[in-house]
Image (tube, rainbow, N blue to C red):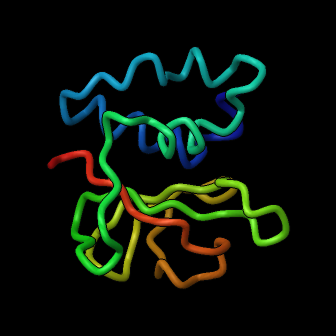
Amino acid sequence: MPAYGVDCSGLVTQALYASGIDSAPISNIQHAQPGHEWNSRDYWSDSRIPHINFNDRQRGDLIFFTDPSTGIIWHVGILLNRDTMIESWPYAVQVHSIYGNRGNIAGVKRVFA
């Protein structure tokens, strides 16, 4: 719903579209379908986006977090530098440290390889 703003994976999807990348089948339409409420999980498992070593992270990489209680991917941000990301965390797009209590860092993926 527009009143709620954009969630973390919606921000990533919009950023990819703005960069000329169509992430289909991951999309805002698919995001509304049962089983895809967490598109961050779909981006994490998308084999088209390579995983990279955490120590090699750089601006533009996607950083993923797991829920501390379940270990399941639940959040994604876009790195602005090695330790800062832009993210959507209820209900606003914000800039925060990657070490800011979003869960456990699961890893990093590079869209622009």
Q: Residue furthest right?
A: 69
Q: Residue furthest left?
A: 113
User: Along the horizontal axis of the image, is 40 left or right of 55?
Assistant: right
Which quadrant of the figure has residue 95?
Answer: bottom left
User: Along the horizontal axis of the image, is 106 left or right of 18?
Assistant: right
Q: Nearer the viewer, residue 69 or 29?
A: 69
Q: Nearer the viewer, residue 1 or 10?
A: 10
User: Along the horizontal axis of the image, is 21 left or right of 71?
Assistant: left
Quadrant (top left, top right, bottom left, bottom right) of the N terminus: top right
How many marks do you count on the picture? Answer: 0
Q: Position of residue 7 (x, y in %)?
A: 60, 44
* Picture layout, residue 25 above or below residue 85: above
Q: Nearer the viewer, residue 12 or 36?
A: 36
* Picture layout, residue 31 above or below residue 5: above
Q: Residue at x 62, y 59 (%)?
A: 89
Q: Position of residue 60 (x, y in %)?
A: 25, 58
Q: Position of residue 78 (x, y in %)?
A: 38, 59
Q: Position of residue 51 (x, y in %)?
A: 35, 55
Q: Residue at x 70, y 40 (%)?
A: 4
* Picture layout, residue 78 above or below residue 25: below
Q: Residue at x 31, y 34 (%)?
A: 48
Q: Residue at x 24, y 28 (%)?
A: 21
